[in-house]
Amino acid sequence: ETGVTQSPTHLIKTRGQQVTLRCSSQSGHNTVSWYQQALGQGPQFIFQYYREEENGRGNFPPRFSGLQFPNYSSELNVNALELDDSALYLCASSDYRLAGHYEQYFGPGTRLTVT
Amino acid sequence: EDKVVQSPLSLVVHEGDTVTLNCSYEVTNFRSLLWYKQEKKAPTFLFMLTSSGIEKKSGRLSSILDKKELFSILNITATQTGDSAVYLCAVVWTNAGKSTFGDGTTLTVKP
């Protein structure tokens, strides 16, 4: 059983640029959630994807968008980067078919720095 | 607004001590409460709690949920230096599995 993987590990971008972060879900998991974790804070829910569709969204602007592919892997895209977007971006996978079971398994994260 | 508050923010203990971490919440459409341990990057899953009063145990760690008073506690007995980490509490709400995390409790266990 493979775990959740994310790429890249680290990324440095300039304000105004666009970035794409990638996540491969754990084998057998069909749901991917993305979180933003600023230093010293808990993860903030960005959105969740299930069956290639957005299945819920937190309080993030539309310049945060995502995709889920048929193999359940996912991308997070952020346009028009701002300095406050600097954070650890975590991806978590789970099996939505297990009703009421929301055990999520997190990837190692992508550290994004916006200068 | 949905809110999850953890206390204390940080805690320093010595090996062998017992600690209790607290998590209180104000969330509509509660589905479950989860505890995670975050050492460097990826939070690792500890417990999922859905029913009041049923203790979950895993080795030296245990947790319980009170859905009437809207809180949960995580106990760690006979702490070890390897228990040093940030402990996160998250509440899952709505069918979409949206979750709200607290800001964590930083536990430092000294030898």
Image: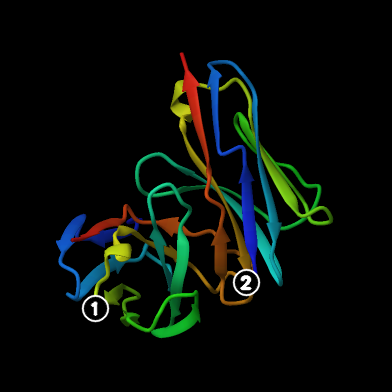
Q: Is residue A36 left or right of residue A42?
A: left
Q: Are marks 2 and 1 on the same chain?
A: yes
Q: Identify residue type, mark 2.
A: Ala
Spot occupied by residue A23 in the image (x, y as percentages of width and height): 29, 66
Front one among B46 and A58: A58
Which residue is at a point 45% across and 22% down the rendered structure image? B81
Find disc 2 in the rendering and name its residue: A99
Q: Quadrant of the N terminus of chain A?
A: bottom left
Q: Which mark lies nearer to you, 2 or 1?
A: 1
Q: Earlier in the sequence, mark 2 or mark 1?
A: 1
Of all residues, the one furthest to the right in this rendering is B68
Q: Chain of mark 1?
A: A
Tag 2's secondary structure? Answer: loop
Spot occupied by residue B28 in the image (x, y as percentages of width and height): 71, 71
Spot occupied by residue B52 in the image (x, y as percentages of width and height): 80, 53
Q: Identify residue type, mark 1.
A: Ala
Tag 1's secondary structure? Answer: loop
Q: Chain of mark 2?
A: A
